[in-house]
């Protein structure tokens, strides 16, 4: 740039605080789901040039249900909120006799309607397994990053990480939950706030 040339100034403007932005803040609420399950993060890109070996699939659960509860309800004002979530899977393809059937998470964090879309790191989830032959029960603990994004009128909550203890320790872990209940999300704008989300559709993949 010539020494006497003045760089052009960028003019910016702040968008008005419209009702649409408030609704968008309400949709952000489901980031609590991390379990809260609550900026988006894409799944890790595959290694180039075939450097990584193929992963062995331990469990694939394509369809399950999920719910989440909040106390007190999440509102426009930041507050400490206790949350718990539970996902149940009834049909899983597995490489062994052990089948996962529930995933649970709970905790307390400061939340508001306006700050829930994005990524929460270091969330702990408990996976319960049942042996299809013996009926024996065992558990795993997974440490995951939970990313919540808005997809049209629904929320997509993705938990990705590693099983750190218990059954299948060291395995890669991915859970996704979609919440499409827009009416419940809009309750974030009421005095009582968002107290629960239901009818979530979820999938689970565990591999090593």
Image (cartoon, helix red, strand yellow):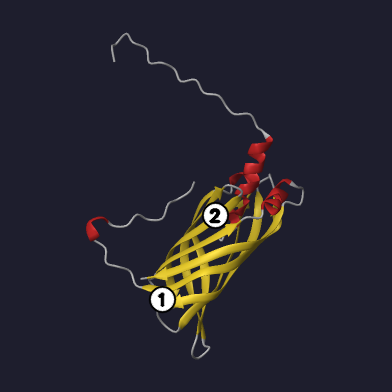
Image quadrant where one finds the C terminus:
bottom left
Q: Residue furthest bottom?
A: 134
Q: Residue furthest top?
A: 4
Dot 2 alpha-carbon crowd within 10 angstroms: few under 14, some 14 to 19, many 20 or more: many
Q: Nearer the viewer, mark 1 or mark 2?
A: 2
Q: Residue at x 65, y 60 (%)?
A: 82
Residue 88: x %, y % from top left: 58, 72
Residue placed most toward the observer, 75 or 181: 181
Between disc 1 and disc 2, whose residue precedes?
2
Is 164 situated above or below 24?
A: below
The answer to which image quadrant residue 105 occupies is bottom right
Task: In the rendered structure, find residue 156 and report the number of the disc placed on it.
Answer: 2
Q: Residue at x 29, y 11 (%)?
A: 3
Dot 1 alpha-carbon crowd within 10 angstroms: few under 14, some 14 to 19, many 20 or more: some
Residue placed most toward the observer, 76 or 96: 96
Question: Element at badge 1?
Answer: loop
Is 135 situated above or below 199?
A: below
Residue 102: x %, y % from top left: 56, 73
Is 76 situated above or below 175?
A: above
Residue 109: x %, y % from top left: 60, 55
Asked whether, in this view, residue 27 is left or right of residue 43, the answer is: right
Question: Element at badge 2?
Answer: strand
The answer to which image quadrant residue 44 occupies is bottom left
Q: Residue furthest right?
A: 191
Q: Which residue is mark 1?
A: 168
Image quadrant where one finds the N terminus:
top left
Is residue 88 among what the camera can see? yes
């Amino acid at each position: 740039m010539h020494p006497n040339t003045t760089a052009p100034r960028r003019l910016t403007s702040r968008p008005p605080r419209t009702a649409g932005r408030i609704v968008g803040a309400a949709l952000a609420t489901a980031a609590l789901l991390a379990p809260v399950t609550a900026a988006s993060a894409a799944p890790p890109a595959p290694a180039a040039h075939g450097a990584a070996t193929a992963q062995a699939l331990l469990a694939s659960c394509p369809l399950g249900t999920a719910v989440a509860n909040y106390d007190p309800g999440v509102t426009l004002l930041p507050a400490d909120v206790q949350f718990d979530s539970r996902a149940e899977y009834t049909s899983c393809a597995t490489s062994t006799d052990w089948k996962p059937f529930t995933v649970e998470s709970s905790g307390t964090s400061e939340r508001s309607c306006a700050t829930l879309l994005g990524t929460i790191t270091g969330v702990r989830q408990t996976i319960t397994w049942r042996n299809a032959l013996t009926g024996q029960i065992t558990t795993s603990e997974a440490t995951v990053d939970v990313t919540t994004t808005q997809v049209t009128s629904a929320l997509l909550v993705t938990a990705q990480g590693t099983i750190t203890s218990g059954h299948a320790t060291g395995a890669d872990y991915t859970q996704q939950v979609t919440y499409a209940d827009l009416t419940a999300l809009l309750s974030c704008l009421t005095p009582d706030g968002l107290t629960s989300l239901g009818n979530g559709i979820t999938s689970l993949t565990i591999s090593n």
